[in-house]
């Protein structure tokens, strides 16, 4: 089995990770120390931001988000972020996450959290109970041909998956079916995507089990490989089950891994990408609904397959296992990954070193067969020296379940690089948007680890050129991580993520005796960001600009008011481009002003505003939202 090491810092897992542990982490052995003596703290492989902008965080630039859920279970993925938010044909949105309403040991009530926002409705009240009646995790979500919703979460204890379905497009998934079991092995960590009732699923196998228990198969020379399954009837039957894709064999790698893959589907085109530090980035594309696949290398690793007896002294650049894939409007594929770097100067063991401080995001597109760095850590520099320098606690891990000597906390997220987890969306006219997670220099917890924010870059020319980086969260003293965007960008970039009070995760970074990262409630947040604001460069401060002036921005309606028709009160979801006041004027069918309301000192961002219709007679009314020098009007009906 492969073993990962940071220079002079051994990479060891906590027993609390259980079946969720990333591959290559030994859950049972004593801690080991790498033989390499130098601690490498390189922060970024590129010296300057590719676009010259700095997307730093400002205390005065607070943005308001919508809470759609919560969870005590704070590890949403081991590596790549799955597609956990899906847009319906009418613009409605379904979102899922791994939830637990209790902090009880082992999280026995863990499962799929679910929320829904209809095309003419704000989000349902935050409900973080699971949709299944079974302990699950790592959900995917999709919309079937009839508009109903499915979720698929894994059973880490027994292997296989629990699939739930809703009875209508607007109802909560509830019916549960056990699918794709493979005794005695344990397939988990699924990614699913669909077109209508054609569901395509990739997964791997758990690498933890009781002594003597079969954990995962070895196929084509790969232990715990990524495998592919397909259903053409909405998940009732699966005509392909856990098959190996062509060319995925020991000439590439000798180990599969959890969550180091992504999938996208558009019509009959299926794109599957697999990434690994010691393998490269490999794409499989099908144009016949998964009947046949062609293998394409988005990025090759010259030392693949990894052999512990072969030196890697030149610290080759590779990927960090966090990856995303999207099919554009011309059926060309785009792949994104976090940059990684590795080293091996010792052939006496099976270990190698990697550099968790690396900060670079790479894009490759099929049409040009070229890759380029589209974001770097320099964009999040806070002191103007051109580098996003971080505290060591940000990229250090526990050793033997304990905090390394001389440190108060650790916050590394598995074996990923500091800039990680791309998630991409595309608009009807082909504009591509990609978010990612990165620590921000100089914004630290009281124990000395840097908090993370989410950044975004975009391309208006099919990926040929990319914008500067903007910071889309900027929450003071809060960590924003595990970001995901809805694939369809409809004038708004729909983003969800997990928000934590402490950098890192409890599941990966807590020393129980010290309690440096206790179990605490994490929030699942949502933001609808106008793409015009992203393209105008106004959603995140650039280095050197001042604080925004209040009451100078625009107000935009994300959703029509709901309920509509209504009696009493109704709600409307808005986006405010700068901090300030919002006035609501209500006029009757004759144009006469019948009521006014004012919301004062609102933060920039999303807000759910309540419109008071008490005392209004039955009929059609126009409500106008006024902010700064802008206004927008919509109609509503009182019953």
Image (spheres, helix red, strand yellow):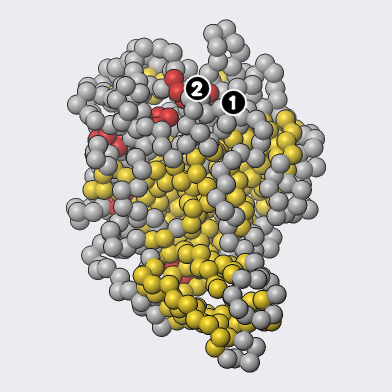
Residue in the picture at 32% in, 28% down: 515
Residue 553 to residue 396: above or below = below
Residue in the picture at 67% in, 52% down: 266
User: As drawn, is 76 to the left or to the right of 96?
Assistant: left
Residue 78 to residue 288: above or below = above
Q: Which residue is mark 2?
A: 18
Contact, CB < 8 Å: mark 2 with mark 1? yes
Say whether disc 2 or disc 1 marks the residue closer to the N-terminus. Answer: 2
Pointer 1: residues within 10 angstroms few (<14), some, or many (20+)? many
Residue 215 x/y as whole percent: 59, 16
Residue in the picture at 28% in, 63% down: 60
From where the camera sits, is residue 433 visible? no
Q: At numbered mark 1, what does the secondary structure look like: helix, strand or loop?
A: loop
Q: Which image quarter holds the C terminus? A: bottom right
Residue 620 x/y as whole percent: 67, 82
- Measure the C-alpha gap from mark 2 to mark 1: 9 Å
Front-most of 611 and 629?
A: 611
Q: Tag on residue 156?
A: 1
Q: At numbered mark 2, what does the secondary structure look like: helix, strand or loop?
A: helix
From where the camera sits, is residue 525 visible? yes
Residue 440 to residue 227: above or below = below
């Amino acid at each position: 089995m492969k073993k990962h090491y940071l220079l002079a810092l051994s990479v060891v897992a906590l027993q609390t990770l259980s079946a969720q542990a990333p591959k290559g982490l030994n859950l049972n052995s004593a801690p080991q120390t790498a033989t390499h003596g130098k601690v490498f703290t390189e922060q970024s492989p590129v010296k300057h931001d590719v676009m010259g902008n700095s997307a730093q965080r400002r205390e005065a630039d607070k943005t308001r988000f919508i809470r759609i859920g919560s969870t005590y279970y704070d590890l949403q993925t081991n590596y790549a972020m799955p597609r956990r938010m899906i847009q319906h044909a009418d613009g409605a949105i379904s979102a899922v996450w791994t939830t637990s309403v209790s902090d009880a040991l082992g999280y026995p009530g863990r499962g799929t959290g679910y929320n829904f926002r209809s095309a003419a409705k704000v989000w349902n009240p935050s409900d973080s109970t699971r949709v299944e009646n079974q302990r699950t995790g790592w959900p995917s979500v999709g919309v079937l041909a009839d508009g109903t919703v499915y979720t698929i979460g894994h059973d880490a204890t027994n292997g296989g998956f629990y699939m739930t379905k809703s009875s209508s497009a607007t109802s909560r998934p509830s019916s549960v079916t056990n699918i794709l079991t493979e005794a005695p092995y344990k397939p988990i960590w699924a990614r699913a995507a669909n077109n209508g009732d054609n569901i395509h699923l990739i997964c791997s196998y758990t690498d933890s089990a009781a002594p003597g228990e079969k954990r995962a198969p070895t196929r084509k020379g790969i232990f715990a490989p990524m495998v592919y399954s397909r259903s053409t009837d909405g998940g009732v039957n699966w005509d392909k089950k856990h098959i190996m894709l062509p060319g995925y064999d020991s000439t590439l790698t000798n180990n599969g891994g959890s969550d180091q893959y992504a999938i996208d589907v558009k019509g009959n085109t299926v794109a599957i990408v697999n990434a690994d530090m010691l393998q490269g980035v490999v794409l499989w594309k099908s144009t016949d609904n998964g009947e046949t696949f062609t293998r394409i290398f988005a990025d090759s690793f010259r030392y693949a397959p990894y052999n512990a007896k072969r030196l890697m002294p030149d610290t080759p650049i590779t990927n960090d296992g966090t990856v995303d894939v999207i099919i554009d409007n011309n059926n060309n594929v785009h792949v994104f990954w976090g940059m990684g770097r590795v080293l091996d100067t010792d052939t006496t063991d099976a270990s190698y070193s990697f550099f968790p401080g690396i900060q670079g995001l790479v894009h490759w597109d099929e049409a040009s067969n070229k890759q380029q760095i589209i974001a770097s850590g320099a964009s999040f520099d806070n002191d103007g020296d051109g580098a996003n320098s971080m505290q060591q606690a940000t990229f250090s891990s526990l050793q033997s379940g304990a905090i390394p000597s001389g440190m108060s906390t650790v916050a590394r997220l598995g074996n990923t690089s500091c800039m990680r987890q791309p998630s991409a969306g595309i608009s009807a006219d082909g504009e591509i948007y990609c978010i990612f997670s990165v620590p921000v220099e100089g914004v630290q917890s009281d124990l000395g680890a840097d908090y993370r924010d989410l950044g975004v870059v975009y391309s208006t020319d099919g990926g040929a050129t990319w914008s500067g980086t903007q910071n889309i969260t900027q929450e003071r003293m809060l960590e924003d991580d595990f970001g995901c965007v809805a694939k369809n960008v409809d004038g708004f970039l729909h983003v969800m993520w997990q928000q934590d009070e402490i950098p890192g995760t409890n599941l990966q970074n807590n020393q129980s005796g010290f309690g440096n990262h206790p179990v605490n409630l994490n929030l699942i947040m949502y933001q609808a960001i106008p793409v015009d604001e992203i393209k105008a460069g106004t959603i995140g401060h650039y280095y050197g600009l001042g604080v925004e002036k209040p009451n100078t921005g625009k107000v935009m309606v994300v959703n029509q008011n709901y309920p509509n028709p209504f009696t009493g009160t109704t709600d409307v979801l808005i986006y405010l481009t700068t901090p300030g006041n919002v006035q609501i004027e209500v006029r009757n069918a004759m144009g006469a002003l019948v009521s006014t309301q004012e919301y004062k000192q609102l933060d920039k961002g999303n807000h759910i505003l309540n419109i008071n219709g008490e005392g209004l007679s039955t009929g059609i009314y126009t409500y106008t939202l006024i902010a700064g020098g802008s206004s927008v009007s919509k109609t509503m009906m009182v019953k």
